[in-house]
Image (cartoon, rainbow, N blue to C red):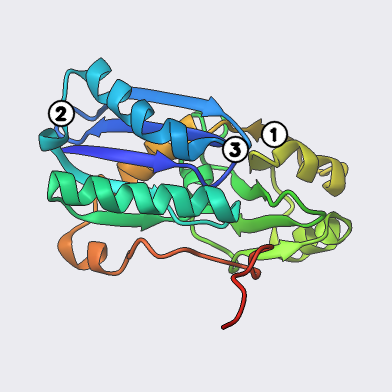
Amino acid sequence: MITLGLDTATSACACALWSQSEGRALAVRAEEMQRGQAERLVPLVQETLQQAGLGFGDIARIAVTVGPGTFTGLRIGLAAARGFALAANCPLIGVTSLEVAVAGLPPAAAGLQALAAIESRREELFLQPFAADGTPLAEPVDMAPALLADFAARLFQPQPMVIVGDAAQRAAEALGPWPAGLQVVTTHGGAEALAGARIAARLDAAAIAGRPADPLYIRPPDVTLPGR
């Protein structure tokens, strides 16, 4: 079973192909960008499929990040993912930007309590804390960096921690020293796209139904449509 993972909700345009039967990544491509995902995503997916020697007919499932993240980026990813799912006649599964940041941690940081930090391109950061086993400790929040130290002290154990995401460095600077040791893993889309594909590949039918590809907004979009 081949799963395609997509991530355009953060600071990259990324896709990955995961083979569940072989237990390995077939191809991963990611390009950092603030804008331009609409023009780049479809060719990037085609290039990734070509690299793996596959076509859309080989895809059994598609995973896409639903946010939080940039409003335009995540809408582009969701629209494209729906089109790909129709073309491949396969299920479409939504995964959050925060959960895939943690799920995509490298082995050296796996098994630590984790803070996922996603860039909002405003003063606040999108954050979510996770226990060492990957269980969320709280719902995602939109938080000013000045509040991060108190937030972490309330939710995390006095144990080693990792901050992961495209805003990991910014969050680490706001947090300050962590007495039990702190790792910082800044991500660039590829690990998230692959993690989303791996998550989607292991879901059963009931779990797929509980993961619609609907946008996750923690705050209203910066740009809104005019009224009638």
Q: Amino acid at mark 2?
A: Gly
Residue under numbered circle 3: 35
User: Which is more N-terminal, label 1 or label 2?
Assistant: 2
Q: Which residue in the rendered view is the most extreme toward the bottom?
A: 228
On the picture, is 201 further left or further right than 1? right
Counting the numbered discs, the total is 3
Q: Position of residue 94 (x, y in %)?
A: 36, 57
Look at discs 2 and 1 and give the one toward the viewer.
2
Residue at figure coordinates x 55%, y 52% from the top left: 72
User: Which is more N-terminal, label 3 or label 2?
Assistant: 3
Residue under numbered circle 1: 183
Other residues around mark 2 within 10 Å, as few (<14) / some (14–19) / many (≥20): few
Residue at figure coordinates x 53%, y 43% from the top left: 101
Image quarter for residue 33?
A: top right
- Vertical order, 78 against 224 (above or below): above
Disc on res. 55: 2
Q: Separation of disc 3 and disc 1 at Cα? A: 29 Å
Q: Amino acid at mark 1?
A: Gln
Image quarter for residue 6?
A: top left
Residue at figure coordinates x 28%, y 26% from the top left: 46
